Image (cartoon, helix red, strand yellow):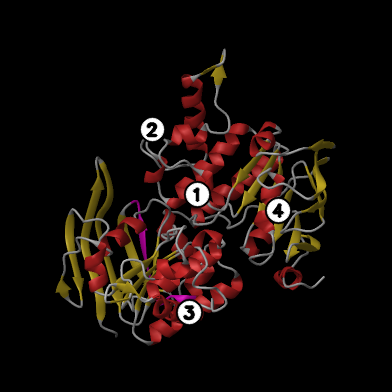
Amino acid sequence: MNPTLVSMHGIHKAFGPVQVLRGVDFELRAGEVHALMGENGAGKSTLMKILTGQHRSDAGDIRVDGKPVTLGSPTDAEKLGIAIIHQELNLIPSLTVAENLFLGRELRCLGVLRQGAMRTRARAWLARVGMQALSPDARVDSLSVGQQQMVEIAKALALDARILIMDEPTAALTERETATLFTLIRQLRENGTGIVYVSHRMEEIFALCDRLSVLRDGQFVGVRDVAGLDLDEVVRMMVGRALEARFPTREVQPGDVRLSVEGLTDAYVRDIRFDVRAGEVLGVAGLMGAGRTELARLLFGLSKPKAGRILLDGKPLHLHAPAQAIGAGMGFVTEDRKGQGLVLDLSLRENISLARVPSRFGLIDRRRERMQSRQLIEQLHIRTRDMELDVRALSGGNQQKVVLAKWLALQPRVLLLDEPTRGVDIGGKAEIYQIINRLAAQGVAIVMVSSELPEVLAMSDRILVMHEGRATALLDAASATQEQVMHAATGGH
C-alpha cells in the first residue's frame, strides 16, 4: 500500500448559522487518483478549500506526510506541495498566458523581468497539456473557455505539486483535450503524485480513479475502491436513494415549426440551416471550435450575422441586441454562468427576476417577485437557506439552476441551452433533464449545445453536427450513434 500523503479527520466548518461540514474524514495516498464525490452543496469544494488554505476549519486535524499542519493561507499549502485546478477559472483575462502562468513568481535578473525565459518555460508547460500551438503571448481573454481551462491546468503543473486537486477539470474540454489530460494524470500517478479528482462525470470516475469518497449534506458517507463498484451504489451513497434512470424517457410529439434558421453566416459559422418545432429538442454537437456557441450567440442577438435570417413562428426576427430576443420570448443559458449568466453580487431573487420582473402599474411587484422566486427555487430544488442570499455563495450546480430559473420565469417560446449541465451532479442533471422534457411538453422549442455525447443522444429529437463553422449532418437521435456523430464532427458527411 502506498504511503498516505494527506489525512483529514473530523473536519467541521460553518459559515454563520449554516453548518457546511460535520466531522468529515478524507485520506489521499501517494500515486492514487481519489475521486471526491457528492451532490452540489455536499461540501466538496469547502473541504478542498480547507486543504488548500483558502478556508480554515473550525475543528479537526490535518496531516501531510503524517505530520500535523496548519494551513492558514494558499501560500502555506503551496509550500507543502499542494495545488488546485479550480472549476471556476482563476486567470486574469487582461494578462497574457505566460504572465498568468508566472503570476506572483516571476523570473527576474537584477530586478528586470526575464521575459524570454518565462516564455520558454511557458511553452514547455503548455506542451505538457497538449497546447504547444498556443502562444505564450496570447491574452487570456482572447481564448476559448476550453483553452483557458488547459492554461489553468498548466499553471498548476508548473508548481510541481505532490498533491494535486482537480475540480471538474474536463468540464470545458473537447474529447481530444480530455484524452491528453487523462494521459497526463496517469503519468503523474506513476510518478507518485496524489490526485484528488472532483467530477460529476461517472464515466471519468470509473475510467480513471482508484478510490472514491462520498460526502452528503456535509457529512462523510464512506470510501470505496472503484474496481468492482457499480454506478447504482455510488448514486445511493450520493443522494441517499436509487436513481430511477440516468436519462428520462422522451415522449413529446413535436408540433409546428417554431424557429427557422436560413443560411445564417458570420465570421464563425457559414450557411447554417435548420428548423426546430414546438416541443422539439434539437441537439447541437461538435468539437471545440466548431461554432456551436457562436451559433447560439447569433440566435440570441449577441452577434450580428453577415447573411441569412431567423424566423420565429414564420415571422422574420431582426435581432440587434439580446433585449429584442428576450422580448420575442427567447432565453439563453450560457456556458459561462459566472461571467455571462449571473450577477454574482445580487441575490437569488434578483437574479431570477432579471429577464422578467413582475410589475403592477409600472412598479415592481415585490410580493409577486418573491412568490415567483420561491416557486422556481422549489421547482428546481435549489439549495439555499434564503432567496436574499448573494448568488455567489451557492455551489456551482445550484448557480446553474438559478440561471435556468431566470429563463423559466420568462416562460419562453424558444430556449437556447449551451452546456446546460456543466458542473452539475448526477441528481441535479436528472432534474434538469426532467425540466427540459417538461418544457418541451409545454411546446417550448429547445436548442441544446452539449459536449457530452450521451446527453445529446438521449435528450434530443434530432442532432445538428457542426465542424469548422459548417453543418455536416442532421441526424435522427433515435437511430444515431456516437460513432456517426463523431464522424460528422471531424468533418465527415
Q: Position of residue 138 (x, y in %)?
A: 52, 67
Residue at x 70%, y 48% (from the top left corner): 298
Residue with the mark numbered 3: 123
Looking at the image, is mark 3 or mark 2 earlier in the sequence? 3
Q: Which mark is residue 339?
A: 1
Q: Position of residue 314 (x, y in %)?
A: 85, 37
User: Which label sits in the foreground, 3 or 2?
Assistant: 3
The crowding category of the residue bearing disc 4, from other C-alpha atoms within 10 Å (few below 14, some 14 to 19, many at least 20), is: many
Looking at the image, is mark 1 or mark 3 earlier in the sequence? 3
- Kind of residue indicated by mark 2: Glu
Q: Which mark is residue 388?
A: 2
Q: Is residue 352 above or below residue 83?
A: above
The Cα–Cα distance between marks 4 and 2, rounded to whole angstroms, is: 35 Å
> Contact (CB < 8 A) between labels 4 and 1?
no
Principal secondary structure, stretch drawn in magenta = strand
Q: Secondary structure at mark 4?
A: helix
The Cα–Cα distance between marks 1 and 2, rounded to whole angstroms, is: 21 Å
The number of discs equals 4
User: Which label sits in the foreground, 3 or 4?
Assistant: 3
Magenta-colored span: 208-217
Residue 371 included in the magenta stretch of the image: no
The Cα–Cα distance between marks 1 and 3, rounded to whole angstroms, is: 28 Å
